[in-house]
Image: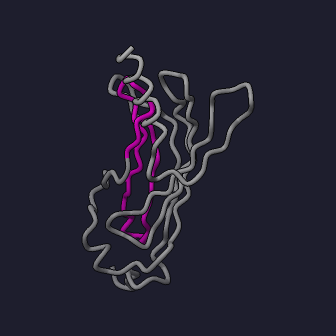
Amino acid sequence: MRALYCVFVLLMLTGCDKNEVGDVSLGIFTTKDIKLDAVADPVVTGVTCHVASIEANLDLSDPSDSSLACRQTGPITADMIAQIDKSKNGEVLFTKSKSIFFKTMKIRRIFDAENQTLMYLSYSTKETSGSFKHSLSTVPLWGTEAYSTHN
């Protein structure tokens, strides 16, 4: 009985997500929902990304499909851009478990210095294999304090 209670509590906690801003049911006879998360960039605080992904409540693994839209929602300064990882791999800003078997959805920020654009990439990974499903959104620095006329 205690084990059943623990499983129930764990299932309830998996539905608790501080980033979740929307939840759309895909129908009465399905256990799949579209979850909408808002993710604020922790360094470039003037950018917020919204990601939509499928959550299959009773499945062991959620689908890898996701959609990503990132927009400027506040000021972007040169100091913020100076603090970000400028490597070609960029840096992971957000992770969300999609399976009990090490499947994770990630959002990564990569800086395109030549075009002065922040690129945000959403993708899923498995420890045993990768996934080709991904989504990309860009936030140009044009019109912000961070835009530089000399590269």
**Apparent side of residue 52 relative to residue 96 in the rendered image (left or right):** right
111 in the magenta segment: yes
Taking 128 as reference, is 136 above or below it?
A: below
Q: Which residue shows up at 55% across the image and 34% down it?
A: 55
Q: Which residue shows up at 58% across the image and 37% down it?
A: 54
Taking 131 as reference, is 79 above or below it?
A: below
Magenta segment main secondary structure: strand
Q: How is the image coloured?
A: one colour
In the picture, which quadrant includes the N terminus?
A: top left
- Between 19 and 133, the residue placed more toward the observer is 19
- Between 72 and 141, the residue placed more toward the observer is 72
Quarter where residue 40 is shown: bottom left
**Apparent side of residue 144 relative to residue 58 in the rendered image (left or right):** left
Taking 17 as reference, is 1 above or below it?
A: above
Q: Which residue shows up at 32% across the image and 67% down it?
A: 43
Q: Residue 107 in the image: x percent, y percent? A: 41, 49
- Between 136 and 71, the residue placed more toward the observer is 71
Q: Residue 25 in the image: x percent, y percent? A: 68, 38
115 in the magenta segment: yes
Magenta segment:
95-124
In the picture, which quadrant includes the C terminus?
A: bottom left
Q: Residue 83 in the image: x percent, y percent? A: 25, 70
Q: Which residue shows up at 50% across the image and 73% down it?
A: 73
Q: Residue 133 in the image: x percent, y percent? A: 52, 37
